[in-house]
Image (cartoon, rainbow, N blue to C red):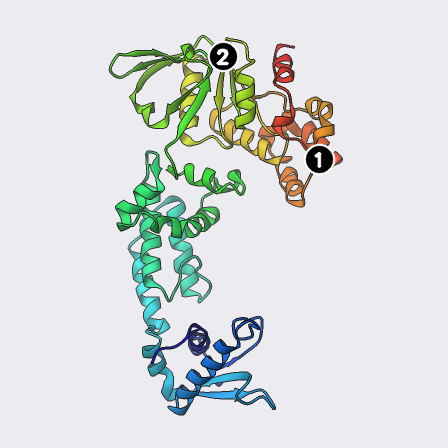
Amino acid sequence: MKLSALSRDLLNSLLDRAEQPDRRTVVRVRLDQRQHPAYYASDDHSARFNCHRELGELAAQGLIRLHWQKWEEGNWLAAIDLQPEGLQQLYQLLKRSPRAQQQVLLEEQLAALQTQSGWLGSFVGWARSQLAAQRSIAPLKLDDAQHNADLLKALSALAELTTPTLERSLSTRLFGDSKRLESLRSALLSVLRRHDPAAPEFGDDDWALLRSHKLDRAPEYLALAGPLNLELQTGERIALGTIEPSIALSAASLPKIKALESQAERLISVENATSFNELLLQRPANWLLVYTGGFASPSLIELLSRIRQAQPQMAHYHWGDLDAGGLAILLHLRKRLGLVQTLAMDAASFTAHQSLAQALKQSDRKRLTELRQEELLSDCFELIDHLLESDQKLEQEAIDPQWVIAALRG
């Protein structure tokens, strides 16, 4: 018997009730608009009547019992009862395994990963505990063994990445399907946000979080401008500063760089593309500019770290948005690189350009208040206080590059 989606949904709800632990009462699903909106949809009455016909056939076979709303028999259902002798037939009809079997299979899948450590080990331990306690295991799905197998396979692969990897490439290697990993992306992010201790640093920037685990959707190129010389493993030397106005260095080329040097007076990292491009056209020739594109990826952190090691006396400044996101990006840089000074990210810069400021959202205020507790941002507390008191924030693009140049020279 072929069932409609609406009938399958109601019958699966019935089996869900039957599988509740220690159930002693009648297995019954009471229909209401919140739990079963499709049944009450006003744009397609035929779906409801088809459902009535299908459920009526099952009721005639003695698998279920239908209860109609008073004076609405044949028109609106009130509840559905499961007849004890119908349980196994409904499992077969819906091609569904009993919960006990589903649980055993998932326990076996998780047990295979019980030796994992770090965020993946934390997730596996949490999922096994949730399963044992009959609590939610989302983003795992007890009734979808294939989804669970694919998700656990993807998580294991993500935990083992050591070099930047493209999502579609990894998906093809794992599943023979370039788009399967995309369909699992929200589940991957859910696990990382719950179990990766560093995840809160990236706020709601999904791709920044995935890049921190070496997964990206496109090849990464690191845009920079200014004096920087590279020596490759082959012995070849390249003077990037001779290429005007800027150059994009492939992240994949970093392992091929044996050494680098710079005669720059300042290293400036810039958060947004517009500001980076405007500043590189007006910067002093002895400034080395690097574009972060939001949160710095692991590859960019490696490049910045190597530049700083090669030229330890060169000061590193960061210019970004005067808001919670910009300060979170600054904090991320400081946690990984140590001292990074601010450039045009202070109360004076905000006040001078306040006519171009935007109103804070409630989420902005919450995040700014949290950042106000970060000791690594103590030099930014005055700015944070200004933002909260004025109930405003300022985009980096509102500040003219000449203001930035003057601020550093002054």
Return the residue nearer the eye: 119 or 31.
Answer: 31
Return the residue nearer the eye: 394 or 305.
Answer: 394
Figure quadrant of residue 11: bottom left
Give the number of the disc on residue 314. 2
At a point 44% along the width and 31% down the height, the residue shown is 297
Q: Which residue is mark 1?
A: 392
Where disc 2 sits, the SS reads loop
Q: Residues within 10 Å of mark 1 (few under 14, many from 20)?
A: many
Left or right: 405, with 236 as reference point: right
Figure quadrant of residue 283: top right
Where residue 233 appears, as percent x and y from the top left, is 26, 17
In the image, residue 255 sits, relative to residue 234, either above or below, namely below
Where disc 1 sits, the SS reads strand
Amino acid at the residue labelled 1:
Gln
Figure quadrant of residue 242: top left
Q: CA distance from mark 1 to mark 2?
A: 34 Å
Where residue 356 appears, as percent x and y from the top left, is 70, 29
Q: Quadrant of the C terminus?
A: top right
At a point 36% along the width and 45% down the height, the residue shown is 117
Give the number of the disc on residue 59. none
Where residue 53 appears, as percent x and y from the top left, is 44, 85
Nearest-to-viewer mark from 1 and 2: 1
At a point 67% along the width and 41% down the height, the residue shown is 365
Amino acid at the residue labelled 2:
Met
Judge whether residue 114 can be spotted in this image: no
Where residue 28 appears, as percent x and y from the top left, is 49, 82
Return the residue nearer the eye: 24 or 139.
Answer: 139
Q: Residues within 10 Å of mark 2 (few under 14, many from 20)?
A: some
